[in-house]
Image (tube, helix red, strand yellow):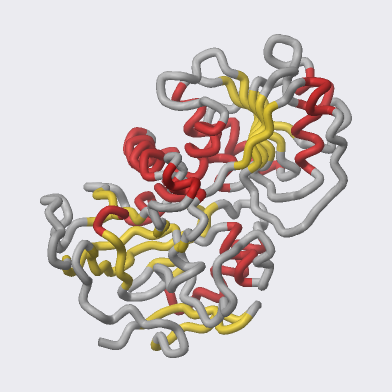
Amino acid sequence: MIVQAAVITEPGIVTTGPAEGASSPVQEPPPGWVALRPTAVGICGSDIHYFHGDIGALTGESDWYPRIPGHEVSGIIESIGPDVTDERLRPGALVAVWPLETCGRCYPCLRGKENACSAIRILGVHRDGGMATRVLASASSVFPVQDLPPESAAFVEPMSVAIHALSQAGLREGRAEGVHLLVLGGGPIGQAALLAATTWGATVAVLDPKPDRWATAERLGAVLALDPEAPDTITRIRGWGEGVGPDIVVDTTGVPSVLQLAAELVAPTGTVVAVGLTGRSAPFSPGILPEKEITVVGSSCAARADFAAAVRLVHSRPDAVASLISHVLPLHRVAEAFDLAQRSDAGTMKVMVSVP
């Protein structure tokens, strides 16, 4: 079998064709694994970093290229390996892929934080990903999604990242009423966090410099969608909620200087969650942490429980999720897809690649 794939051969270069130079996943699935035919694959901000060689926030490999990208994956099961006993995982089933492989033995894994595994391997980063006509996945990492459109099924992964970020601040299904949440950044993860939080009953505001993202946020339920550079924005956010600012601030931007803004805007004793990846740094005034007794937490990927919650949420809000998918391009136009995603022009939200 010749696997067709998109391959990042070196920073800034992606080609499409037979998967030569990357570890072509043509073998039959081993025990406990399934073989998938990917159907839709999203392009994430971390994919853009990887595409440009900005891997300062990643660990675990010395040779990063060539690599088939893609960790936001939906696919149809083609075959199953021995010992796969889940009756839902049969050839023809559409699934979403939790893209992590974890060791189960390290300090984070033993404390229930498998998503922060010290030996983590991420599909499309540490091993070849979903932008190919065939990929292998552990049966424990694929989630049946029934009748979802393939693109919405692929959006389960970014939704799970957003849900994990909210859970880091104690926000989850049944525990969001009365909470005021500020999302910094109105890209796909920011909008997914907004959608999850409003679905659960939180009151949400979004800051982003792009007007088209304000409109998206308002349509998804944000009570405020503001330009962070506008003269009155900071005053409005600081006086929001109970007059002391938001209970939780989630930074999805990956811009180092934004963490200082998050600490300044969050209510005293509130929580700041850092989601965006970056290898860069910026000045930070740590005195604000004890002064306001702020909790600052990081959020890494998503655990299996978050992924299961994301499947439920995407099923419950299908139209809202579909509205966040702005572009779907075929595999042979993958270079154009990466260009669209990194330019992020007005009207661009989630860019996806369809796999034949």
In the rendered image, residue 339, in percent from the top left (x then y), is placed at 62, 69
Judge by depth and name the residue closer to the eye, 225 or 159: 159
Give the image quarter of residue 44: bottom right
Left or right of residue 115, residue 37 in this image: left
Asked if 290 appears above or below 126 in the picture, the reply is above
In the rendered image, residue 303, in percent from the top left (x then y), is placed at 42, 44
Q: How many marks?
A: 0
In the rendered image, residue 133, in percent from the top left (x then y), is placed at 33, 75
Q: Is residue 269 visible?
A: yes
Residue at position x 41%, y 52% in the image: 105
Judge by depth and name the residue closer to the eye, 204 or 309: 309
Please state, as top left, top right, bottom left or bottom right, where the N terminus lies in the image: bottom left
Residue at position x 59%, y 54% in the image: 348
As drawn, which residue projects farthest toward the top?
242
Left or right of residue 69, residue 86 in this image: left
Q: Is residue 321 visible?
A: no
Left or right of residue 235, residue 300 in this image: left
In the rendered image, residue 152, in percent from the top left (x then y), is placed at 38, 50
Asked if 124 appears above or below 242 in the picture, the reply is below
Left or right of residue 319, residue 145 in this image: left
Residue at position x 50%, y 33% in the image: 195
Please state, as top left, top right, bottom left or bottom right, where the C terminus lies in the image: bottom left
Residue at position x 42%, y 44% in the image: 110
